[in-house]
């Protein structure tokens, strides 16, 4: 999987990014998520601007692809295998550590999430649990608000599908920060992905949602 940090046109469509898992080769048929567009790898270039046969995990590469125009690509899209594509969801649960913030955080709070190469405005429809500082245990009842120094579990929602994974599965695709008014207000780890067909069910019964680590 490769989150896209940049795209442009140069004798075709070029995308730039770091291979975060797996590998890719010239001629591979891959999928661009979250739009599920099939593309072909036409050429791969390393950091020295040399054409190479493959990009391995950890490599920073430029890739010329066929099957999509650069205007239809945005930073935060992910190039992925069609057999095991990255998840694209609008809701997920995450563990948040609240940092400096001038106000309390409650249900309905909005901020900008920064995860891999994506910056996306998000809403917290519900706070689900808080962690007791003394015992480290998760509360059964949802907190009314969260403030500096607390750790909580919250439901996070985006306006459109975003490419993310659970932190436990792919740390680099499951860790993020929340920023508000130019400050980092929380750091987070995604603990549960909520598929599109379950969003309504979760929203209606949000107080009963549990986290599966």
Image (tube, grey):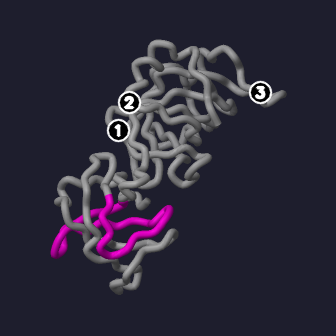
Q: Are marks 2 and 1 in contact (CB under 8 Å)?
A: yes
Find the magenta span and give its range.
Answer: 4-30
Report which quarter residue 162 is drawn in: top left
Q: Which mark is residue 196?
A: 2
Instruction: Measure how far apart labels 2 and 1 are at the Cα level.
Output: 9 Å
SS type, badge 2 = helix
Upstream in sequence: badge 2 or badge 1: 1
Q: Residue at x 40, y 77 (%)?
A: 54
Upstream in sequence: badge 3 or badge 1: 3
Q: Nearer the viewer, mark 2 or mark 1?
A: 2
The residue beneath circle 3 is 137
How many C-alpha atoms fall within 10 Å of the one at disc 3: few (<14), some, or many (≥20)? few
Q: Residue at x 39, y 58 (%)?
A: 81
Upstream in sequence: badge 2 or badge 3: 3
- In the picture as drawn, the residue positioned furthest to the right comes out as 134
Q: Which mark is residue 103?
A: none
Q: Residue at x 40, y 46 (%)?
A: 163
- Is 50 magenta? The answer is no
Report which quarter residue 172 is drawn in: bottom right
Quarter holding the N terminus is: bottom left
**Relative height, residue 70 to residue 34 (above, below):** below
Q: Relative to residue 67, is residue 49 drawn left or right?
A: right
Q: Nearer the viewer, residue 128 or 21?
A: 21
Instruction: Give x and y (percent) for residue 146.
Output: 61, 24
Q: Relative to residue 157, is residue 167 drawn left or right?
A: right
Q: Relative to residue 34, is residue 102 drawn left or right?
A: right
SS type, badge 3 = loop
The residue beneath circle 1 is 161
């Amino acid at each position: 999987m490769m989150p896209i940090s940049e795209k442009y046109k140069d004798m075709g469509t070029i995308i730039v990014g770091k291979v975060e898992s797996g590998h890719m080769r010239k001629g591979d048929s891959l999928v661009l998520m979250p739009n599920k567009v099939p593309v072909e790898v036409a050429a791969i270039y390393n950091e020295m601007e040399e054409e190479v046969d493959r990009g391995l995990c950890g490599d920073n590469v430029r890739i010329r692809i066929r099957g999509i125009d650069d205007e239809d690509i945005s930073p935060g899209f992910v190039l992925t295998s069609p057999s095991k594509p990255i998840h694209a969801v609008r809701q997920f649960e995450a563990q948040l550590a609240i940092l400096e913030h001038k106000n309390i955080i409650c249900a309905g709070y909005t901020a900008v999430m920064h995860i891999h190469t994506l910056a996306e405005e998000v809403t917290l429809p519900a706070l689900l649990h808080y962690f007791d500082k003394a015992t480290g245990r998760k509360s059964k009842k949802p907190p009314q608000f969260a403030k500096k120094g607390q750790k909580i579990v919250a439901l996070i929602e985006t306006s459109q599908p975003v490419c993310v994974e659970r932190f436990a599965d792919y740390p680099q695709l499951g860790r993020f920060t929340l920023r508000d008014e130019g400050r980092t207000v929380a750091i987070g780890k995604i603990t549960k992905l909520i598929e599109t067909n379950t969003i309504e069910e979760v929203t209606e019964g949000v107080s009963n949602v549990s986290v599966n680590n």
